[in-house]
């Protein structure tokens, strides 16, 4: 039975909040009390571990599509992660009204290629969505993701007031919370973050990128941001993590703006261990996993390992 068959829509429609100052409609300012009793997500999205395959593969290639495909193929290929007839949801970072060159959002070239690969594996539908911080229409367009993903065959969905269900996230900090339904009413979840410095959490990579699946008053979670990140990572458990390090935002994250803050690294990481993925990717920012609180907490919680090399690591340089 597909995951979406386990879930029922609950609660009444949420009231759309208009925010002035050019930021548009911010769904994460909505009250969680607008929703009724939470339903539970049925299971994780992970694929079984294969001891013959690495958990983390890094590919460096100035051809970014080639980098993605080299990394994906080395970790088992798309058919390991997507089966014919399955519905796939891809979660890029589409948070900010920025161009691809500014490295605040996931590279649209990578998102489009992942859409194509999922469809080639027989996916019945590929959805691309995120909850933006700036105006969603401007952000989806200026990021380049909407056009690229649609041209590749995806259904690109901007969040609307009817798209949230209250979910029992089951975390220490995050319990009942509104979640964008596309990220639970699916068969496979592919997380596609970009590597960025972050003013509150040191970095935003795969686990922090999952903030974009929830509505509600997200600013309340900043008081214990490490625990909220780990709660979301434990809840979502993506099928595959694809880290965009083609361009890396070294400073003034997560929004950025200046091209002088961006380093071109031409790298893509595919991983089945989101903790190991973040531990490797944060090195582009000059850190190690041991120096980032939420990565350490995720390992302590049992979500994965910081020691990505001993977990199973492969590097491909072209």
Image (cartoon, rainbow, N blue to C red):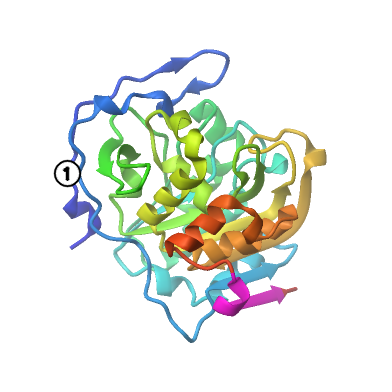
User: Residue at the location (52% across, 30% down)?
Assistant: 133
Whether the magenta-drawn stretch holds residue 243 is answered as no
Residue 111 at least partly seen: no
* Direction from residue 182 to residue 308 in the image, left or right: right
Q: Quadrant of residue 110?
A: bottom right
Q: Circle 1 — which element?
A: loop
Number of numbered callouts drawn: 1
| The C terminus lies in quadrant | bottom right
User: Could you say where residue 265 lies in the image, as x and y percent from the top left?
Assistant: 75, 58
Residue that mark 1 sits on: 8
* Direction from residue 209 to residue 16 in the image, left or right: left
Mark 1 is surrounded, within 10 Å at the Cα level, by few (under 14), some (14 to 19) or many (20 or more) other residues, namely few
User: Residue at the location (39% across, 59% down)?
Assistant: 237
Q: Is residue 3 above or below residue 84?
A: above
User: Residue at the location (45% across, 57% down)?
Assistant: 190
Q: Quadrant of residue 43?
A: bottom left
Residue 138 at least partly seen: yes
* Direction from residue 123 to residue 21 in the image, left or right: right
Whether the magenta-drawn stretch holds residue 311 is answered as yes
Where are the magenta residues, as a range?
307-316
User: Residue at the location (77% across, 45% down)?
Assistant: 262
| The N terminus lies in quadrant | bottom left
User: Could you say where residue 41 lies in the image, as x and y percent from the top left?
Assistant: 25, 52
User: Could you say where residue 315 lies in the image, as x and y percent from the top left?
Assistant: 67, 75
Q: Is residue 140 above or below residue 188?
A: above
């Amino acid at each position: 039975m597909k995951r979406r068959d386990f879930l029922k829509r609950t609660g009444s429609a949420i009231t759309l909040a208009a925010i002035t100052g050019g930021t548009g409609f911010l769904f994460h300012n909505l009250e969680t009390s607008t929703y009724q009793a939470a339903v539970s997500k049925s299971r994780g999205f992970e694929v079984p571990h294969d001891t013959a395959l690495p958990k983390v593969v890094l590919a460096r290639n100035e051809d970014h599509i080639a980098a993605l495909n080299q990394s994906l193929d080395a970790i088992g290929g798309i058919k390991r992660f997507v089966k014919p007839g399955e519905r796939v949801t891809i979660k890029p970072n589409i948070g900010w009204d920025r161009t691809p060159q500014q490295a605040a959002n996931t590279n649209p070239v990578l998102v489009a290629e992942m859409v194509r690969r999922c469809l080639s594996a027989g996916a019945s539908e590929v959805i691309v969505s995120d909850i933006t911080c700036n105006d969603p229409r401007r952000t989806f367009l200026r990021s380049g993701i909407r056009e690229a993903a649609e041209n590749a065959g995806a259904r690109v969905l901007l969040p609307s007031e009817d798209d949230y269900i209250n979910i029992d996230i089951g975390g220490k900090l995050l319990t009942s919370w509104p979640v964008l339904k596309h990220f639970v009413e699916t068969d496979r979840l592919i997380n596609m973050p970009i590597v960025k410095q972050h003013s509150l959490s040191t970095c935003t990579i795969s686990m922090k990128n999952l903030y974009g699946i929830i509505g509600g008053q997200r600013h309340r979670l900043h008081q214990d941001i490490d625990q909220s990140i780990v709660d979301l990572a434990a809840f979502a458990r993506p099928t595959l993590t694809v880290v965009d390090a083609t361009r890396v935002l070294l400073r003034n994250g997560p929004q950025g703006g200046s091209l002088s803050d961006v380093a071109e690294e031409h790298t893509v990481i595919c991983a089945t261990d989101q903790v190991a993925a973040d531990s490797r990717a944060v090195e582009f920012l000059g850190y190690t996993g041991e120096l980032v609180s939420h990565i350490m907490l995720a390992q302590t919680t049992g979500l994965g390992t910081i020691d990505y090399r001993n977990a199973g690591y492969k590097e491909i340089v072209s």
